Image: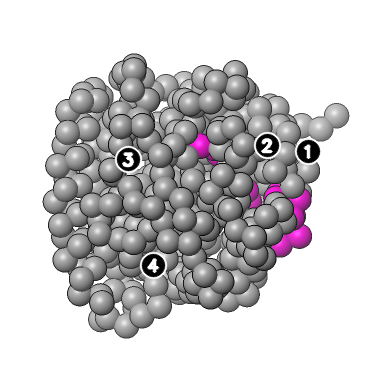
Amino acid sequence: MTTTPDLFSPLTLPNGATLPNRIAKAAMEENLCDAGQMPGARLVNLYQAWADGGTGLIITGNVMVAPNALTGPGGIVLQAGTFDTSGVEDRFKKWAKAAKSGGGHLVMQISHPGRQVFAAQGQQPVSASATKVTLPGFESLFETAHALSGDEVKEIIARFAETARLAETAGFDGVQIHGAHGYLVSQFLSPLTNLRDDEWGGPLKNRARFLLEIVRAVRAVVAPGFSVMVKLNSADFQRGGFELKDAKQVVKWLNKEDVDMVEISGGSYESPAMQGRTIDGDASSTLKREMYFIEFAKDIAGVATMPLMVTGGVTKLSTANMAMETGSVDVIGIARALAYQPDLPKQWQAQQNAEINWPAVTWKNQTFSALAVMSMTKAQLHRMAAGKRPKAKISPALALIKDRLRQKKQTKQYRNWLAGQA
């Protein structure tokens, strides 16, 4: 009889690196850059709080591989030449040092948004094909993407590799390639957004080529002990899109690519399952209230040879323990709960069965609901970045308004910076 690993037992990854426990701070978009899309004191403060909280694996919010491809105007950019400017490398090193000070394994999430770019940012969106994000009532927020040429695809692959190389130079322990939530890698994987008929489109093997080539390019430029992870959708939750059977096949291919961990997630801007909701009713019955993607992980665990991480909805120690007891999960990813209680892992280890109760957002419009949830989380991140404790109660409407105003200001600053990059 095998024993299920304890939540606070160490985990050795395929590359030999060891996580001190099985709790991960999953990626959350911080939008906390300093001028020039650089990290600064605010990010140091925020990640110091999580490091002090006892998290075994810390994954940053998405760091962008190209200056004209950001999920939000306050995002960090790391690309070739970034460290040529005096003092910039030290900024990344200070960020890494703070995040690792508690003994956790630090991973930089690296990403390209593809078509999921707000038009107000002044960027030309790109994607596998010339498609557009469709949100009823919000069509004007997005533009039709430029279909990438073969050479442009290869250039973006090289960008992922260079960002990973620079992350290692700055002291990060690994990278996570963002292949979920409808961003560019996910757009290549989905038959709804990848309409190509060349080597990058058509059958799943071709649609997965972009992700596999990124993994290979990254692995080729980093040390063997540097962790390479992938965040993958279990499904898009859109009819005719990327499905569970597709995810299982992609994981089979990733088994052969020296990947150290796969995080299971789901959804996109058009179907925000990562907020515990899904537009497609057929999928909603599969999602659990407190562990959105656990059922999918059980299936994927049957084919995966690398450790699996599942994120989504965990607020209680009992839920995390139940997930571990399934035997299909190696790491429990926690996002929003750590924005409300950064020392939750230490509380749990001390047998304090703390749980997080955030205000429910029950608005009829799912898009506004998802935006409000994210805005509430960002409000807590901004408090910690300013050296304050998270707030016990926060208004969804007020958080959304403040976030929109902040984003408007950041967008103006970002567009001015981007104009200087030309």
Query: Disc 2 marks which amino acid?
Result: Leu
> Gap between marks 1 and 2, in whole Å?
12 Å
Of pointers 1 and 3, the one earlier in the residue sequence: 3
Q: Which residue is mark 4?
A: 66
In this view, 297 is above or below 218? above
Query: Disc 1 marks which amino acid?
Result: Gly
Query: Disc 3 marks which amino acid?
Result: Glu
> Gap between marks 2 and 3, in whole Å?
28 Å
Label 2: state its secondary structure. Answer: helix
Residue for point 59% across, 25% down: 283
> Gap between marks 4 and 3, in whole Å?
24 Å
Label 4: state its secondary structure. Answer: loop
In this view, 212 is above or below 159? above
Residue for point 76% across, 32% down: 3
Magenta residues? 250-267
Q: Quadrant of the N terminus?
A: top right
Q: Which residue is mark 2?
A: 244
Q: Residues within 10 Å of mark 1 (few under 14, many from 20)?
A: few
Q: Which residue is mark 1?
A: 302
Q: Residues within 10 Å of mark 3 (few under 14, many from 20)?
A: few
Task: Please indicate whether residue 99 sits to the left or right of residue 35 in the image.
Answer: right
Disc nearest the viewer among 1 and 3: 3
Of pointers 4 and 3, the one earlier in the residue sequence: 4
Of pointers 1 and 2, the one earlier in the residue sequence: 2
Q: Which residue is mark 3?
A: 139
Q: Are marks 1 and 2 in contact (CB under 8 Å)?
A: no
Of pointers 2 and 3, the one earlier in the residue sequence: 3
